[in-house]
């Protein structure tokens, strides 16, 4: 403004009105102070919490004003830290804490200062349990009726977590907690786990401020498919690397850092190991601690576990030990060679579990060293389902064969005996071990109809006797994994939110355990609970259980019965802890009542339609993903960590791979493109300048098609064409290599992978970030020339 008269006039106007403005401002503040300003708690039904209104004073300049800087959100007064530990594929009778033969001293010491729950339940499978645990809703209610790799297009089965079911991490973060997750996630659709996302169903978009672990259903413990936040990363390069200590290292560092910077701010740490899911990988010194301990076999050792459970009091004195299913062999019917193999499998698993317990102990020790253990509410859930029988009737040295319906012979397992637990195997134990360590119950993982699949040990510890007044006590109220989230909310002092991020929330379906902390005799507040997995179904209602096991065993590909042919059983678990006495014939009216109740609950929680398919649902073509409708894929730069659900699907079809390269010197070599690794996969690479294609059929048969001559210096186009035989999944075909349209090699690949290369293997361009498909090279074997473009075409 250049006119001095106008400027002076404006200043005068401001001077005349400044008094009026000050008067009106003061008047506004006076009246606003008479209105009831909402407290933080008044906003608790809507998250994130809004910033409080400005309570200062605004004048013409800062001299007439009073600041009121927004204050950070603080957790409720005296809110505890929360440590939520979840093991994978551990049976009720596996840990020493619940009568098992495997030493778990850190779980034992938590139980001595806390409470053991002997009627705590999971869903019988990995992803569903985790979704229920984190949301407080039944797994079908949050669209996770099965693991993410088997998702289908029905509301209860899409594996797409709903925004109407916020995780406990989201709630705690919005109430002033720092939050972090370590280990196995397994709650993102597998076609959304690439670098292209979307990331709204990754841990860091579901309430966790930091994530370090893996996204899939399992991973190689020696060479994991690691993710940090939203980045696929390489494992630390050290010779003694194992995933579980690495997870503990990162958790300890995060907790120490958080407490150093914000000691008055509580933390929520979700520590979900990949252990003890297959592959059973453990340092040899931990495995050797159990040498000879399982030589008596699963029948005798199940009896030993049962006796220990009775002595510890973790099962009632009148409990009956349920018999071995006829589908599993008696130990005494086996050969001495089989005894040797199967005993070693159990030793490997035992070492894996003890090693895992030790790493969790390190995390607990770190919290104790900070002086925060008494102020930390600890949940230690020993298994996301019962022990796994997916190793079948021989055990396995390569679990990926199970996923692809390929049997392993005892001779193959015997040949790899000395490698079990190490980097050369992707191993699992015999199904009968899973049954044995689920003592005293029937069946195993996947069998949601019976407690062998769904009963897991739970320990809750919280500070000194002022919080848990019965340290070392036992609680027998019926509870389910959906009860953990509401327990945390009640313990922290937070109401269940009605709206989160603008989305109305579906009610939490679990029941808090807090009522049972001080009263061992109080009746259970959790009155009714359905169970369903792959058509195995059950219903609990105030002490009664109806159960129907469906006709596919956990190690089988297809069901042998229809749903109408399933036999329903009836148990009164107030008198029959282990479901040993079937009352269906004596009380058909009660059975019919519970069958009707199951159907009612199934409709309510989106369980229907029942679906018993397994192997067919592993096929990535059965669901929409980033590759749907595409037959041509082009990559212009080095790319790493593309999961199978987002990669070109070369299975059961003809395809071609074309690589445009510029070789700058003789001997340029490295990976052009690869998928999978040591236990199933393929690789297109140059070795000493020679174009090569290697196919690894489930670590049993390897085919290498290689040019006899290297490519010339300069630009070249290298192509591999595969012509598929057709027919049933997993058929063979013929492969041809060419350089600049001139064929240089041809070979026959007799068998191909029909369904999955793995749950953690990745598709990489220009390097190999996992294990190698062949021993011709060592990872990462990055290409040393100029890789200009790689194109895959699917026919």
Image (tube, rainbow, N blue to C red):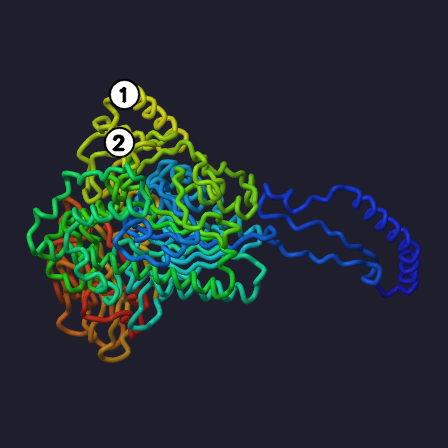
- Residue sitting at 31 percent across and 68 percent down? 241
Q: Quadrant of residue 70?
A: bottom right
Q: Earlier in the sequence, mark 1 or mark 2?
A: 2
User: Is residue 620 in sight in this rendering?
Assistant: no
Q: Residues within 10 Å of mark 2 (few under 14, many from 20)?
A: many
Q: Residue 580: where, in percent of width, then height?
A: 24, 34
Q: Nearer the viewer, residue 562 or 158?
A: 562
Circle 1: element type? helix
Query: Residue sitting at 35 percent across and 70 percent down?
Result: 236
Which residue has dot 1 on it? 588
21 shown above or below 507: below
- Measured from the top left, where is residue 50 in percent x and y? 64, 48
**x and y, in percent, of residue 718 in the image:** 22, 66
Cα separation between marks 1 and 2:
14 Å
Residue 229: assigned label? none
* Quadrant of image for the N terminus: bottom right
Residue shown at the point (13%, 65%) measured from the top left: 745
Q: Which residue is mark 2?
A: 548
- Residue 738: horizontal and vertical position, in percent? 18, 65
């Amino acid at each position: 403004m250049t006119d001095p008269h106008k400027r002076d006039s404006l200043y005068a106007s401001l001077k005349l009105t400044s008094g009026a403005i000050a008067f009106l401002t003061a008047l506004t503040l006076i009246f606003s102070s008479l209105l009831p300003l909402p407290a933080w708690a008044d906003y608790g039904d809507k998250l994130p919490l809004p910033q409080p209104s400005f309570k200062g004073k605004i004048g013409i300049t800062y001299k007439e004003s009073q600041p009121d800087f927004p204050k950070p959100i603080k957790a409720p007064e005296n809110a505890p830290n929360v440590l939520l530990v979840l093991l994978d594929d551990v049976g009720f009778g596996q840990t020493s804490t619940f009568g098992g033969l495997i030493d778990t001293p850190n779980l034992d010491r938590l139980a001595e200062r806390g409470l053991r729950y002997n009627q705590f339940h999971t869903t019988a499978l990995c992803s569903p349990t985790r979704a229920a645990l984190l949301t407080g809703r039944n797994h079908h209610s949050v669209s996770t009726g099965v693991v993410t790799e088997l998702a289908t297009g029905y509301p209860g089965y899409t594996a797409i977590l709903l925004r109407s079911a916020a995780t406990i991490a989201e709630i705690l973060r919005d109430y002033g907690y720092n939050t972090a997750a370590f280990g196995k996630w397994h709650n993102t659709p597998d076609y959304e786990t690439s670098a292209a996302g979307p990331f709204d169903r990754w841990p860091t978009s579901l309430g966790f401020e930091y994530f370090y672990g893996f996204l899939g259903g399992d991973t190689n413990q020696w060479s994991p498919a690691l993710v940090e936040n939203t980045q696929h990363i390489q494992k630390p390069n050290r010779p003694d690397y194992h995933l579980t200590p690495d997870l503990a290292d990162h958790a300890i560092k995060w907790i120490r850092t958080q407490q150093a910077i914000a000691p008055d701010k509580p933390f929520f740490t979700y520590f979900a190991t990949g252990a003890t899911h297959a592959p059973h990988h453990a340092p040899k010194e931990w495995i050797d601690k159990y040498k000879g301990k399982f030589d008596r076999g699963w029948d005798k050792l199940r009896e030993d576990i049962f006796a220990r459970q009775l002595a510890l009091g973790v099962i009632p004195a009148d409990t009956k030990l349920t018999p071995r299913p006829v589908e599993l062999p008696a130990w005494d019917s086996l050969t001495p060679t089989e005894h040797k193999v199967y005993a070693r499998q159990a030793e490997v698993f035992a070492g894996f579990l003890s090693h895992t317990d030790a790493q969790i102990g390190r995390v607990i020790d770190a919290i104790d060293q900070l002086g925060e253990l008494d102020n930390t509410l600890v949940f230690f859930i020993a298994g996301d389902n019962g022990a796994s029988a997916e190793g079948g009737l021989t055990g396995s040295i390569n679990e990926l064969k199970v996923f692809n319906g390929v049997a392993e012979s005892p001779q193959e397992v015997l040949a790899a005996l000395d490698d079990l637990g190490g980097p050369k195997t992707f191993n699992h134990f015999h199904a009968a071990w899973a049954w044995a360590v689920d003592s005293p119950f029937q069946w195993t993982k996947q069998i949601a109809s019976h407690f062998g699949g769904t009963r897991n040990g739970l320990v809750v510890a919280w500070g000194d006797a002022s919080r848990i007044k019965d340290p070392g006590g036992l609680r027998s109220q019926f509870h389910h994994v959906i009860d953990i989230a509401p327990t945390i909310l009640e313990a922290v002092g937070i109401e269940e939110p009605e709206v989160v991020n603008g989305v109305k929330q579906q009610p939490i379906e679990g029941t808090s355990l807090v009522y049972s902390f001080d009263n061992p005799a109080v009746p259970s507040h959790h009155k009714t609970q359905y169970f369903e997995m792959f058509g195995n179904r059950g219903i609990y209602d105030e002490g009664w259980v109806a159960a129907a096991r469906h006709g596919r065993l956990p190690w089988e590909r297809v069901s042998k019965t229809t749903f109408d042919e399933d036999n329903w059983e009836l148990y009164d678990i107030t008198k029959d802890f282990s479901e040993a006495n079937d009352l269906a014939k004596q009380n058909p009216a009660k059975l019919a009542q519970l069958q009707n109740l199951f159907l009612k609950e199934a409709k309510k929680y989106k369980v229907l339609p029942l679906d018993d398919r397994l192997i067919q649902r592993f096929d990535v073509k059965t669901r929409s993903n980033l590759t749907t409708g595409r037959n041509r894929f082009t990559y212009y730069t080095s790319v790493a960590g593309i999961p199978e659900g987002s990669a070109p699907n070369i299975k059961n079809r003809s395809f071609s791979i074309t690589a445009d390269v510029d070789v700058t010197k003789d001997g340029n070599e490295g990976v052009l493109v690869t998928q999978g690794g040591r236990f199933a996969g393929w690789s297109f690479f140059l070795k000493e300048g020679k174009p090569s294609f290697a196919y690894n059929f489930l670590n049993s048969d390897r085919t290498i098609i290689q040019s006899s001559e290297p490519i010339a210096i300069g630009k070249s186009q290298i192509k591999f064409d595969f012509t598929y035989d057709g027919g049933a999944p997993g058929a063979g075909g013929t492969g041809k290599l060419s350089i600049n349209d001139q064929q240089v090699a041809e070979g026959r690949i007799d068998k191909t992978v029909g369904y999955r290369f793995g749950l953690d293997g990745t598709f990489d361009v220009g390097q190999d970030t996992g294990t190698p498909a062949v021993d011709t090279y060592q990872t990462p074997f990055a290409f040393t020339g100029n890789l200009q473009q790689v194109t895959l075409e699917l026919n």
